[in-house]
Image (cartoon, rainbow, N blue to C red):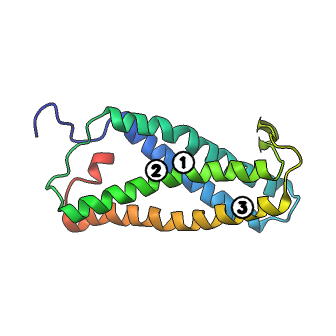
Amino acid sequence: MSPTTPSRYAPALRWLHWTIFAFVLIAYVAVNLHEVFPRGSDVRSNVLAAHFLAGIAVLLLVLPRLAVRFAHVDPPILPPPGRWTQLLSKITHLALYLFLIAQPIMGIATLQIAGKPVSIFGVTVLPALFGPGSRELAHQWEEIHGTVGEIFYYVIGLHILGALWHHFIRKDNTLRRML
C-alpha cells in the first residue's frame, strides 16, 4: 500500500456510516415499539415521531454520504477478495443505498397521500401538500413501506454478516476500514 492509499475510509464517511446506522436502528425500534402503546396515547405519538425523525435524518444524511463516498478513494481490501465476493458486495451496497433513499421517501409519501403533514414532536416539517388525501391509498402505501422495511432487514443482515465473515473467516481488513 502506498503512502497515499488510505487504510481506512475517510473520517466523514465513517461518521456518516455509523450515524446513519444509529438512525436506521432508531427508526426500526420506534416503528416496532409504537405498536405496544394504545392508539391516541402521547407515548405512541412520540415514539412514532422518533420514527419520522430518524427516517428524515437518514434521508438528509445519505446524500452527503454518497458525495463523500465518490469524492474519496476506497481503501483496498487486503488480501483482495475474489470476483464473486466483490460483485456480491457491490450489489449489497447498491441495495443498501436504494433502501436508505427509498424508505424515507415512501414514509413521507404515505403521510402526504393521507393528506397529513410530516410532523415531528408537534412541529410540522412538511405540510400536507395534496389536499384531504386518500385513506385507502395511504394504507396501501403504508403496507408497501412496511414490506420494503422488512426486506431491508435482510439486506442489513446480509451486510452485517458479510462484514463479520470478512473479519472472522477471511480475516481481511474489510471491517477495520470502517472503524
- Label 3–label 1 contact, CB within 8 A: no
Give the residue at mark 3: 142
- Relative to 120, say whether 88 is above or below: below
| In-front residue for pair 17/136 | 136
Instruction: Tell me the number on the disc at residue 163.
Output: none
Q: Residue at x 21, y 37 (%)?
A: 6
Q: Secondary structure at mark 2?
A: helix
- In percent of width and height, residue 96 lies at 45, 55
- Label 1–label 2 contact, CB within 8 A: yes
* Lower sequence index among marks 3 and 1: 1
Instruction: Tell me the number on the disc at residue 101.
Output: 1
| In-front residue for pair 178/89 | 89
Q: Is residue 106 left or right of residue 130?
A: left
Give me the C-alpha separation between circle 1 and circle 2. 6 Å
Q: Residue at x 74, y 49 (%)?
A: 49
Amino acid type, mark 2: Tyr
| In-front residue for pair 21/128 | 128
- In percent of width and height, residue 75 lies at 23, 43
Give the residue at mark 2: 97
Give me the C-alpha separation between circle 2 and circle 3. 20 Å
Which of the 4 image quadrants contains residue 129?
Answer: top right
* Lower sequence index among marks 2 and 3: 2
Task: Tell me if mark 1 has few (under 14), some (14-19) or many (20+) residues whose alpha carbon lies within 10 angstroms of its own.
Answer: some
Q: Secondary structure at mark 3?
A: helix
Amino acid type, mark 3: Glu
Q: Quadrant of the N terminus?
A: top left
Q: Is residue 54 left or right of residue 42?
A: left
Q: Residue at x 57, y 43 (%)?
A: 59
Amino acid type, mark 1: Ile
